[in-house]
Amino acid sequence: MDAFLSLPTSHCHARQPDSVPAIHLKNEIKLRTATTEESTSAIIHSVLRIYPLSASEQVEISFVTSNKGNPLILCDNYLFRCNKTTAQKKYWMCTEKGCSVSVHTTLNKELICLNGVHNHLSSPEQLEAKLVRNKMKKRILTETIPITKIYDEEIVKAKLSKSAAAILPTVIEYRSNMSKTRRKITSVIPSTVMIEIPELYQQTLSNERFLTIDLFLKRGQDRILVFASNQQLELLFEFCMEDLRVAFCLLPNKRGKTYTALMEQLKEQVNIVGKQFNPKRFVTDYEPGLMPILEQEFPKALHSDCMFHFNQVIHRKITAFGLSRDYLHNESIRDQCRQLMASSLTPIDEVKNQFKRLQTIMSTLLGDLLLYFKHQWMYGVVSIEMWNFHNVDHRTNNTSETYNLRFATRLSRKHPNVWSFIQLIQCEHVRFEHTLIQLDAGASIPKQSKKKQKLFK
């Protein structure tokens, strides 16, 4: 026996320290039941009031907000409001009047103990509806998406029970209340350009300068706003990476004077940050007010337009001249029109000879189209160098068009107010920062699909 006791021993099961407090609790209840005349329920209530929760039996807590924006604790399907805060703890009381159950947490929102037993039943459907409303409210106050759309999206995500769905406000009721709440935190919608932009909208979401240029071309009208962070300006004045938007320019019109003022302001920013602004190439659509200004301000830079927009303009003229039916049903007419559009891919020193050849073989039905092409593209408004894409790497501005479509989709409305617009470009700046970090870490820019490559080459 002595030899047996001297041998090392070990348990054949894992330790369960979390069960020890529960055993002590049961023993305490049994002892008080045997030695006192108190009712069993009173004893249980009394013991639970001082019973600390162990690690494994801790009730999970989450934090929500009240209708007035005050913090609440959701614990075991009951809500608690903050009653008192000390240097080390926070004390929370059940929100139900007459219920003395309390929760103690650290200042870091970690649960310490739950004291007492509730004298009322919980309302899980009320809590379920409240959690959905909180998610809706958070999105409504931080996003520019229409309230109705947010309501519908959160309803789909929540998968509410029938009881919760029955007590949830209808979309009309909720939209009415939340529209007022959203307006309270939104600056007054301006009716003229004579507005003072609050500091909140002059900065990025990380409180850095964002409103770079604020210029009145005329007193009380024609205002130019340019939003760009210092990091974006450095990229603008050094090089341009595909799929990175480095400046958001709000212009009152598309006149040459406006574009000239914008370029002059950007050049001033160059001097401020000590950079060089000598772009080697511009790719734009066919904006008549912009083209001569770029040539004037940057005479050494190459300026090419977009092949997609070039073909689109020709297609519009085919329709305008009443040739749509012939283009659709007459293969010869369709082939001749396509040859005309393919002039943009001909070597630049052969373009004029190619056009002369087309003049001799094209149908008389295409006389108006040929005359237009001659005066607009061959010997008229737009120089051949701008619409010739032979040996050009980037023939379209599809990346810009794709971005514009995504941006318009995020706006979710055709005519947003100026504050909603600025909030969106503030979010776009965050996206820019993340994308730049990913590119610096070695991420590659998404490639065009094979379908698009065939279409635009």
Image: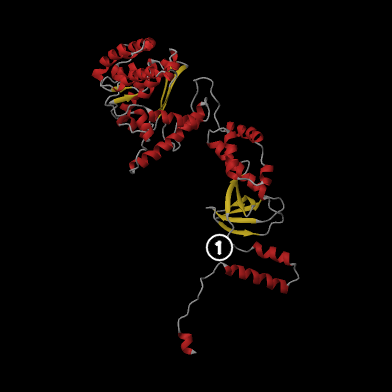
The x, y position of residue 404, in whole percent, is: 44, 29
Q: Nearer the viewer, residue 216 or 140?
A: 140
Q: Residues within 10 Å of mark 1 (few under 14, many from 20)?
A: few
Front residue (pair 32, 238): 238
Q: Quadrant of residue 121?
A: bottom right
- The residue located at (72%, 56%) in the rendering is 119
Residue at far bottom of view? 1
- Which x, y percent locates residue 321? 43, 12
Which residue is identified by label 1?
56
- Seen at 76% across and 70% down, the residue is 37
Q: Say which quadrant the C terminus sits in.
A: top left
Residue 311 at x, y = what percent? 37, 21
**Residue 404 seen in this snapshot:** yes
Q: From where the camera sits, is residue 200 visible?
A: no
Looking at the image, how many numbered discs can be counted on the residues? 1
The three-letter code of the residue at mark 1 reads: Ser
- In the image, taking residue 456 as reference, residue 43 lies left or right, namely right
Give the answer, above or below, for where 111 lies relative to 179: below
* Colouring: secondary structure
Residue 250 appears at what percent x and percent y? 44, 24
Q: Residue furthest left?
A: 349
